[in-house]
Image (tube, helix red, strand yellow):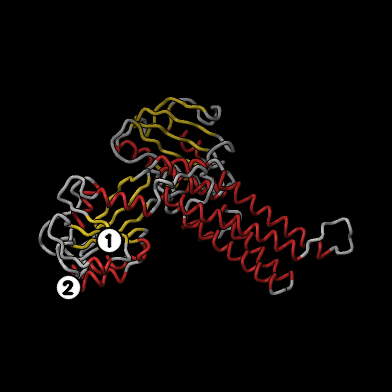
Amino acid sequence: MEDTIVAISTSMGVGAISIIRMSGKNSIEIANKLFKGKNLEDVDSHTINYGYIINNNKIIDEVLISVMKSPKTYTKEDIVEINCHGGISTTNKILELLISNGARLATPGEFTKRAFLNGRIDLTKSEAVMDLIESKTESAREIAINSLQGKTFNMIENFRNKIKDLLSRIEVNIDYPEYYDIEVVTIDKIKEEISIMKEELNKIIEESKNIKLIKNGIDTLIIGRPNVGKSSILNKLLGEEKAIVTDIEGTTRDIVEGEIILNNIKLNIIDTAGIRDTKDKIEKIGVEKSLSLIDKADLIIVVLNGAEQLTDDDKNILRKVNKKNTIVVINKNDLEQKIEKEYLKEFNIVETTTTKENGIDKLKDKIIELFNLEQIEAKDYNYLSNARQIGLAKKALEKLEEVENGLKENLPIDMIEIDLKSCFDLLGEIIGKTYSDEIIDNLFEKFCVGK
């Protein structure tokens, strides 16, 4: 991290201002080469300085330059932010000049990555930065702010301290058994503490599922054979004509996506190609893609035509879905019904029509009921907030279960310690106390450039 990085930190396009950010030991020096105004190397830290960006004695733009000196900055390095006018040409020209004078274009998330590697923020705060940028509901924003304030870090660090304390007491008992003034850590005592830890970690994981739902939304898949009304239902849910609706089978050949907010929870809706046996190569690809999404969805909406009897394609779809997270929509209930409802009695059923204004209100009500959306209210946002964190917590819980099983089987205490230390390290990965370069690179490459 010896080089100086630079990137445009605002969205590209026409606007009032653009902000170009530089971080690194040479950032002030590089900016000073192009700046006509005060000597930036002599100004106080955390000041805004008026002047011009100059190239070959030509004025490129009138700017305000913020100078923030290490270590009290976002990255703990010297940072310069150039506020220029928001034209694309002007912004790119200034960026080009900064690069030609010694800066390097930053990779996605590299400013936040440097903040993490320099000890400015932990890994949960790093993830919270992007969560805050991407939050689309008030609840998602509150979750991100909580993590950004360090509450997730504190929760995990406190849990790790309990494990560290238990490990220390076990070590003392092993190494200094002759001392009478130390606490004797018996197998029963360890079992008791592990049981409490398991219960606490399991609660964190379970509560975090709601947090993940609030933050990321419900991935909702609309599936069914052609011409049952999938695209019409999507359009009604979104309140716009997103998907093309015709009487021609196979009109939707690829996935169509959209989002709605239902009870402050985001639904990420995907309308898929109609599923049927087909010889059309393009349509067949769409069908295969539709089927591949079934296992990834939080909610599956299977649409059937109530005015027709169930076909082999209908039955094939119903066999492939998980009944627990599936709502079967019997569409076209304004027509004479011919569908065999007895075949569907194990499913959550909703009868709808897309020809009426409020025709799919029952579907929305069923989604609210199925996911308990009226009760999901994160009064305490102090939980894990993404799949990476929850996955590591689950692995840590498995290690605690291995410790518990090892105690029951009277395994040597040094083997018990190995699993306990593994649990400690896995929790450390959540907050970045332990990590690999590959994991860090993969995490930050999902960020936007300039953050």
| Type of amino acid under label 2 | Thr
Mark 1: which secondary structure?
A: strand
Q: Is residue 428 visible?
A: no
Q: Is residue 154 left or right of residue 279?
A: right
Residue 12 lies, with reference to residue 177, above or below; the image says above
Question: Residue at the location (66% across, 63% down)?
Answer: 421
Q: Which-is-in-front pick, marks 1 and 2?
A: 1
Question: For the residue carrying disc 1, how many other residues have a C-alpha within 10 Å: few (<14), some (14-19), or many (20+)?
Answer: many
Give the label on residue 192, or none: none
| Type of amino acid under label 1 | Val
Q: Quarter-wise, where is residue 70 in the image?
A: top right
Mark 2: which secondary structure?
A: loop
Which circle's residue, 1 or 2, is located before the other in the chain?
2
> 224 or 219: which is nearer to us?
224
The residue furthest left is 247
Residue 228 picture location, percent across and down: 17, 61
> 338 or 239: which is nearer to us?
338
Residue at image mark 2? 278
Give the label on residue 328, or none: 1
> 414 or 75: which is nearer to us?
414
Q: Is residue 427 left or right of residue 62?
A: right
Residue 238 lies, with reference to residue 336, above or below; the image says above
Question: Residue at the location (16% across, 47% down)?
Answer: 356
Residue 232 picture location, percent across and down: 18, 53
Q: Is residue 102 left or right of residue 321?
A: right
Residue 289 picture location, percent across and down: 27, 66
Alpha-carbon span between mark 1 and mark 2:
24 Å
